[in-house]
Every structure is written in C-alpha cells, then in structure tokens.
Image (cartoon, rainbow, N blue to C red):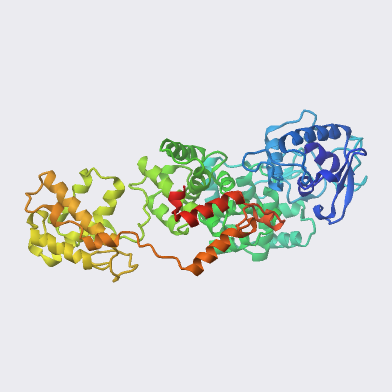
Amino acid sequence: MVALAYDGALRREELVQLDVGDFEHAHRLIHLRAETTKSQRAREVAFGVTSSQLFVAYLNERRGMFGRIDGPLFRSASNRNYGKPLGPSTWSKTVEGIAHTTVHPHLPAPAADRSGPRRLDHRPDRPVRRPPRLGDHHAIHPSVRPGARCPAAPRVRIDPAGQGELAGSTGGSPVSATEPPAPASLAQHCAKTAAQSPVLKPEERAALSRLAGLDHQVIHERNRVALARLIDPLEAVSARWGNALTDSARNMLLMEVGRRSRAYWAWDEQIWTVFVASVTGEIRHRRRAHLVAWGYLFGGHRRLHHRVGMPKLRPLADFVFGHGAIDPALEQVCTLLERWETSPKSQPELVRSSVLDALLSAGSPHLKDVTLELLQDLVADHPASSARRRGLFKMSRVLAANGFIPEPLTGSHQQRGTRPETAASVPLEWLEMVRWRKISTNEPGTIRTKFPLLLVAGRWAAERHPEATSPQAWTRDIAAEYIADAVIAVRGQWAGHNRNRTGWGEPLSASGKAGRVDTIRSFFCDLIEWEWITPRFDPRRVLALPLSVRAGRDPDPRIIDDAAWAKLMTAKLTLTSDDLRAYGTPRAKAAGWHANYYPIEMIRALVGVWLFGGLRMDEIR
C-alpha cells in the first residue's frame, strides 16, 4: 500500500477503493475509476518494478487467506473484520503509526531556513524538510510543473509578547521561542489565557479579515504578529499532541473567531457546541477532538464531548491529560473486573468508554477524583438502555471496592429517598431490630430487596398498632392482621419518603404481595432463631403465604386461536434472509451490503422449536 500510494500519488480514498480489476499488470498501470477520485474524473497512473513485485507477492498471500475473490484489493486480516475491505480511517491510523515509529535514513536533512509566505497550517515546532527536487526520483513523473512551487516561508516563532524572529537568521527583531508548557503547569497556562480580555483588538480584526479573504489561508509575518495572542496559546497546548490535523483545526477555530468577533476562551458551552456540531464531513469530522480539547482546556467545558456526541473519547483524553496518562486508571478498572470474571467482551464498549467519560468529566486522569455525585449526574445523562450507562455501573463497583466512593451505584438511586428521610417515619424500636440486615446470611441483593419491605412493616405497625412498634410486642392476632392488610394493599401504601411515584394507588401484584409476606416471615424466623425475641407465635404458620396469592403467581397460559396459529405457521414456512435485520456499518448497508449474523437455516430451526415446543427463550438455550 505504501509503494502504490507513493508511485501513483494516490489519495487515501483512492488507495483503499482499489479493485483487483483496476490493475493492468502487464503495463504496470492502475485505472482509477471516476467514482473513487476527488475530481470525479477517471485517470491512469503507473507504478514501478518494485511495486509490481510487492503487488504479486500480496496477491499470492491474499489468495491463501481469502481465496480467489474479486472486488476490493486490500482486505482486513483482523479477527473482528476478517475479509472486509479496509476503510480510509484504518489506512490513516497505519500511516500515523509509521510516522511516529519510523525514521528513514535516506530522508533529507531538516531545512534551517525557508523564505516566502507562511501558511496557517505550518507548525513552528515541527522540523521542515527540504522538498524533493525534480531529479531525485527518475522513475516517477513529477506532479507539479517546474517553477510552480510557491516560495518557501521563513520559520517564525512568536512569544506571548508578540515578538519574533526568523529561524536561522541573524537579524530582525528579538526572538523568544514559545515552549510547550509542562503538564503540571497546563492548567495554570490555560487559566492565564482565559483571564485575558475576550474583545478582539483592531489589528486582530484586520488580520482575521485578511485571512478570511484568502483562498489558501496564507499568513504573512505581520498577520502572525497581530494574531499572536490567539495562536500562541493554541500552539503551546497542542505542541505535545503530535497530530497532523492540529494545524487545520486551528485554522477552523481562527476563522470562527473572526466570524464571532470574540476570543475563543470566552465562549460558553452553547457556542462551542454549535461550532463543533457544524464541523461535518468525514475529513472535517476528524478535527472534532482537537476543537473539543481546546474548549475543554480554555473554556472549562468538561461535558462538551457529551453535548456534541463524540463516540470515541481516547484521542480527546490523550489531548487533555497527555498521551498515556489515563492508562493506569483503565488498567486498574479492567484488571479488577477481570478478577471478578467479568466478560472481557464488554470491557471495550461498556467500561473503557465509561471510564474515559468519567475522568474527562472529573477533570483528572486519576480514579480517586471521581465522586459518587458525578457518577449519578453522568448516569442521568444517558438512557437506561445505553452501553455507556451500564459501563458506569460497573465502574462504580470498582471505585467502591477501592474505597474511592462510599457505595456503588444502584438502578433506583434517583427514585428512592435519602436514608435519613426514609427511616424518619419508622419507629426506633423497629429500626433497632432491623440491624438484622448487617449480620444476615442472605445474598446482598436479597438483603437490599427485603430491607424496604421491613420498613413497610414498621410503618404499618406504627399506624395500626402504636403499642406494638417492636417485633417483641407482636402477637398472633397482629401478625394475622398484617397478612390480611398485605393482601389488599396498594402500591405506595406505607412506603414513606419515596420519589418513585410510578403506579401509586394500583393494587399490588401477586409477586408484590408474596414479597411482603415472605420477608416478614423470614425476618421473624431469624429473630427467634438468634434469640433476639421471645417467640409468641409460630411465624411459619401464622405468616404463611395465602393459597389465593400463591395461585396468582403460577403461569397463566392462554390458548392460541386458529387464525393466529395459521399466521405464525405461514411466517415460519416463508421465512427468508430478507425478513431478518441485516448487520453492518451504515456505509456498508448504503453500498448494498446485506448479511445476517446467523445462518437462515439455524433461524428456521429455532422458529420450529419455538412454535411446536412452546419453549421460552432460556429454555431454548
């Protein structure tokens, strides 16, 4: 891929969309189809002998891996997307990884001086290499006519005071190269920038208007000096990012500053959200992480990534905290979940993104800075069925196990009242006996379910029998009266302080009635067995579940009429793969890709078992 891209000067989209039939190997030519090119015009490019040899070797390897298949040439060998065509983003990540890890010994030395106009996307801290001359590569036709290159620009570094000089020159104004701030002083640097006046100066307005009127966004030295107050903080923060898209993202931000006539550090969250949301298109969309990072650092908008809907938070976390700063937190959470035998398949989707979301919202790469109140606010921002929300629950259990938060999250934490308000309506004598929950041998989930039902019994005793607010004072008649009231009780009755008003006033279901009766029976059995109270009745007989309630818990099957059965049989006999929901990315579906996760023969067998066996889902498994 590198050789073909180099020989044919192919763009990213042109390279990954090459088909096997696009190659004319006898003449070493590539036919680029019009639908794959940026200009929508077909063209032909040549490739060299070395690329031809590599192409033949790859075809042999490809045939052994995927067989003799036509279509896209370059296909994935990963287990997740085995045999699928490579996408533009995969190639971009590969090239970026090569750029960070490879230093070619034959690359020309960095140039110390360049002359001419300077582009906005030039980085002063990036070494500028000499462009290849026309005679450097004899086997490749030049893509630029001789003499068409623009004169090179001098490398200018500007200090916060607005002074600068040409790199490598001996004259001019004094120089003060801006060094990137250390991670420890990054917050102070951003706070110092945000303390400046957001009103643009006349020279800044003039420089931004001149830049907006240029087709190629070329910046000259005088404009650079005028915009030093806006550009230097961005470059100082992003100097450690090492991303080729940083310069173009900075240009987009400067153009938006010119349109709004207000410095970016004074924008509120709504302005940042509207601006980042307006960045559309596949190429421009990749700049979102840079823009959100600047809004996070200079504006303090820690939930901006959630407002704009960023699905991938790892690049943003590396920009904000530094590359690899959140790795210890991720490893700590994932290691403990693996020790608890949590499914490793759920960690990338459920846990890692949730940990990144929580750390970004907390403004720290350390788990100890995540609070229970913050987790509750994050859970409230996500729907009940979202993977991010389920990951936050798993993360809360890890934080509680390490002592960072007092207790893990529960699904009903927003519906129940606080413990002091909930217990205020329960008699003290009854609460003293409810210390049963601390030494009970039941499962923790069972104890959490029984505890509010025991409080219901204490409130009932305070209302109906104020003289029997202690379990020791309960008699056989009081116990029988409680069972009778539990059978006819409604939702919310004796519930105390509770924010969950769903279904209040409706009759309890058979399971709800059985829960109240079974809880009070097991409670009295434990108190008598532990000799906390003197037995005055047999709880197994007096507090037994009535037969009428027990019968209501049994399954209530219904007979399927002939018309419904005929429809089900017809659907089973005519079931095809087109009736099932296809899986795949939106781009693949738009391109006509249609495939089912399971074979259609397997689905037909399952439907037959379900129809004729009447089995439930867990029974079929």
Question: Residue 27, percent across and down?
Answer: 93, 39
Q: Residue furthest front?
A: 562
Name the residue rendered at 62%, 55% in the picture.
Answer: 582
Question: Residue 311, percent across and down?
Answer: 57, 52
Q: Total of numbered circles in the picture?
A: 0
Asked whether the viewer can see residue 143, the reply is no
Asked whether the viewer can see residue 390, the reply is yes
Name the residue rendered at 39%, 49% in the picture.
Answer: 371
Name the residue rendered at 66%, 61% in the picture.
Answer: 256
Q: Residue furthest bottom?
A: 505
Q: Quadrant of residue 319?
A: top right
Q: Quadrant of residue 208?
A: bottom right
Question: Residue 384, percent across and down?
Answer: 45, 58
In the foreground, 457 or 607 = 607
In the foreground, 47 or 232 = 47
Left or right for 399, reference 219: left
Question: Residue 548, percent across and down?
Answer: 23, 63
In the foreground, 34 or 281 = 34
